[in-house]
Amino acid sequence: MENGVDYSKGEGFLSRMALNDNKAGMEGLDRDKINKIIMESSKGSRFYENEMKREQQVNQRIEKMMLQKAQITEQQLKKAQAEVDRMATELERRRDLSRVIVHVDMDAFYAAVEIRDCPELKDKPMAVGSMSMLSTSNYHARKYGVRAAMPGFIAKKLCPNLVIVPTNFVKYRAVSAEVREIFAEYDPHFQPMSLDEAYLDFTDHLEQRQSWPESSRTHRFRASSAATGGEQPKLPQEAVPEEKDLSPVLFDDSPSSSPVRGVRGAGGEFQVFGTSVEEAVREMRFRIEQKTMLTASAGIAPNTMLAKVCSDKNKPNGQYRLLSTREAVMDFVLSLPVRKVSGIGKVSEKMLNALGISSCSHLGQQMALLSLLFSETAWHHLMQVSLGLGSTCIPRHEERKSMSTERTFKELSKVEDQLSLCRELCEDLAEDMKKEGLKGKTVTLKLKNVNFEVKTRALTLTYAVATVDEIFAVARDLLKMEIDNESPKPLRLRLMGVRISAFVSLDDKKPLQRSIIGFLQPGKADSSGSSQGINQKLDKAHLPNHSFQTGPLACVALAQNCRRQEEVPWGSKQRVLEGGQPDDQPKQSFFQRAHAKRLQLQAANASVQEEGLGENAFMITFTDTCAQKGVESSTKANKSNCTASDLSQKDFVPPVEAHASTSGCGAAVSESLTCPVCFSHVETTDLNVFNRHIDQCLSDASTKTNQFSVSDTESDLDLENHQKECEEGESNGVDPQEDQRSSENNSLQTVLLINGDNKTATLSPPQSRNDTGPILICPVCQLSQDSDDLTIFNHHVDLCLNQEVLHELGGQTLSPINPPSVINSKALDRSRLLPKQASKGKTKRRDSPSSPPSKKAKGPRNTIDKFFR
DNA sequence: ATACATACC
DNA sequence: TACTGGTATGTAT
């Protein structure tokens, strides 16, 4: 700083790009020079521009925070201070110094493994990863500023002699397993945080250890090591300071801190360890090294937060013990830079720095202010950090909450490529899901465009999925929605990912029942979820000092109203939800509300006769006025055909006389309508009357949704368009099966049964002359579906229902020419699944100028037709 | 529930 | 030429 620009904090520089010398092994390097090289390698790139943008967003957050700070009055501060003091007292009262927590961290793990297996690398600067990204580097390389999470091509500029070795996770996992075997001997409940680090609770081990005979504390040197001595591959030792533990393998004169010397016996060499914590940890590290030829560092402290910091203190190949006294802890913490604390990252550090806080001592001094500027979670965490508090137990390994796979690639702009990639990802994900026997209800698509802007799109189903087809059915539609939203511009992607979450437990796949089980067996069902919730509540009430897991202090409270939409190019066509209707109730689709209401009715012994359809089933009959097969298109021009909002009175005959489904004729509307909620027959053909009835039925749960009116004119136009499109489809060489259906299934009446429990759908047998198998027609979008697989069909219906909700929310502001794409995906589906010719034909037809504009093109549609509304 | 940001390795 | 991939969690809407 004194000899040049401070690249990490200077104005105009991206603190997020600067060299992060937080980690070990970066002492005494020329930061300015390194940062200059990093900058020159990055400047002007899309990545850099995006980083710039994000940095500005952070700066804005900070500005707002400072503004907020300026408005804080003395009185507010006083009051806050009182609360902070109260809490500090309470936290102090609960301080627990009785546990001995150890954090173990393998030194430059991947790099060390590679060096072990290729001794030529020993004295060279090397890193593991690729030209695009490095996972880790050895200590030689770190001297040049080469470190984890740095792209290899920049590292090469910093250190032209750098050797980059590709990652080999199979190997790392195997080594990790060996190390974990040792961990388990000291704490069977240890918690691995990654392949190379873990938290252990040594308390119990130490208690037992006191009575162990020396023989139990004696460990043998690796035989081959001992025999060949210096010839063995060495670990990176270049930066080992004097006071470090020195590996007996590498240095005969073991550190004097070790009270018991190694013993050379006839059968080899032994090392005896004492009964103290330090000795126990040293022993563990010794055993790790003997077993794997890799070194580890460790931190010993009364809680996890401190142990983590301590393990970094004497890295590599060292350990540090923080005594379990309040004085030692407070001393340690006072000089601790906030950035060293797990959970406080670049952004949090920057925000704190803006408030003049860089060490934990400042943290304690500014708690009152922080309590006013930061969220409760955030300042509570900071408060604990400032007092040197942290988790004093090793939490049982929690069940995984999500599983994902993502891939970065060279720009991908073609829809077909994007879709096939999406499918690949789903295949990979499904495979992983299968391995763990998981099923989840939420599918999330992640996209990153060539400008590094990331967005995610998620959909939660009412049931759990796991197979490729199931996941892809969702991911594909989410992707198409984005493609369509961006249309006619292509999505220029550099990354795509698929994640699945909201897992349901294996033993019961019915989420509804699961909650019941949870209710009946609180102890069991509480194990992970609820108990945590209870803990959190306790935290707020009593603030036990072990309650807080380290977590990011994520956001300044005043940043709440920050709107970023305008700044996001992606968002140019984003649905704007502010225009949605005032609605206190949770958003539910019609089906969901109907179903919920029906459950209510049943619970109240409404005793609805179901004609043997099973409970919670209701029946919808609707008429396929026009075979929908010709309708599909990926262009936004007519994708609107498929949204629930577009269902018109003529397109969609509402729950009509459920039992009349046997009629094969496409009778328009029956004389009476069956309410999907109460199942009574409403003697009317007037949909307004019918709607009023349904509203009545739904009234309890009913949200004050807008009463959108149906435009008959538009419905007519819609029908015309449908018919035109059908003809188009026929004359344009669509796939044969489709042609057959479109020509033969006009007026096919289909009955869909939806079972309230598991959403299985069944159809009446095909009424048409040619038995082409049952045709599944979505009751929401009314398009017949390609697949005969009911599961897949159900996915589709779910998507449509969800889309309906989206529309309901965003309908007012949703661009009429830019509706969701969820349903209109069949052409694209086929383009992937069918031979090239077929897809070509499709594409051609789709792009054909003779293709009639859909109803969307006819004019803005600013109402939402929710089923019968 | 969804989207996005932050964080960790 | 080239700036990851997997998971969790906090915040806002």
Image: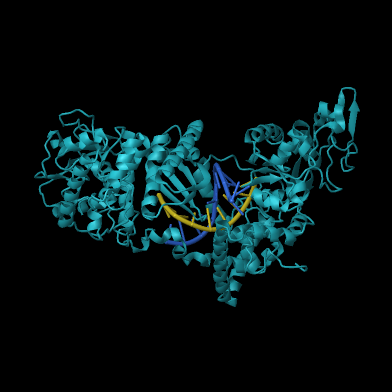
Chain colours: A cyan, B yellow, C blue
Q: Is residue A753 visible?
A: yes
Q: Position of residue A50 (x, y in %)?
A: 54, 59
Q: Position of residue A213 (x, y in %)?
A: 82, 29
The image quadrant where one finds the C terminus of chain A is: bottom left
Q: Residue at x 50, y 42 (%)?
A: A404
Q: Residue at x 52, y 47 (%)?
A: A410
Q: Hey, which quadrant is residue A540 in on the image?
A: bottom right
The image quadrant where one finds the N terminus of chain A is: bottom right
- Residue ranking furthest to the top: A267
Does residue A222 lie above or below A856 as drawn? above
Does residue A35 lie above or below A258 as drawn? below
Give whichever of A530, A578 is nearer the camera: A578
* Left or right of A681, for residue A488: right
Q: Position of residue A568 (x, y in %)?
A: 46, 61
Give whichever of A687, A4 is nearer the camera: A4
Q: Is residue A516 visible?
A: no
Give the total of numbered labels.
Answer: 0
Give whichever of A838, A862 is nearer the camera: A838
Q: Position of residue A287 (x, y in %)?
A: 77, 33
Q: Residue at x 55, y 57 (%)?
A: A46
- Residue ranking furthest to the left: A671
Q: Hey, which quadrant is residue A166 in on the image?
A: top right
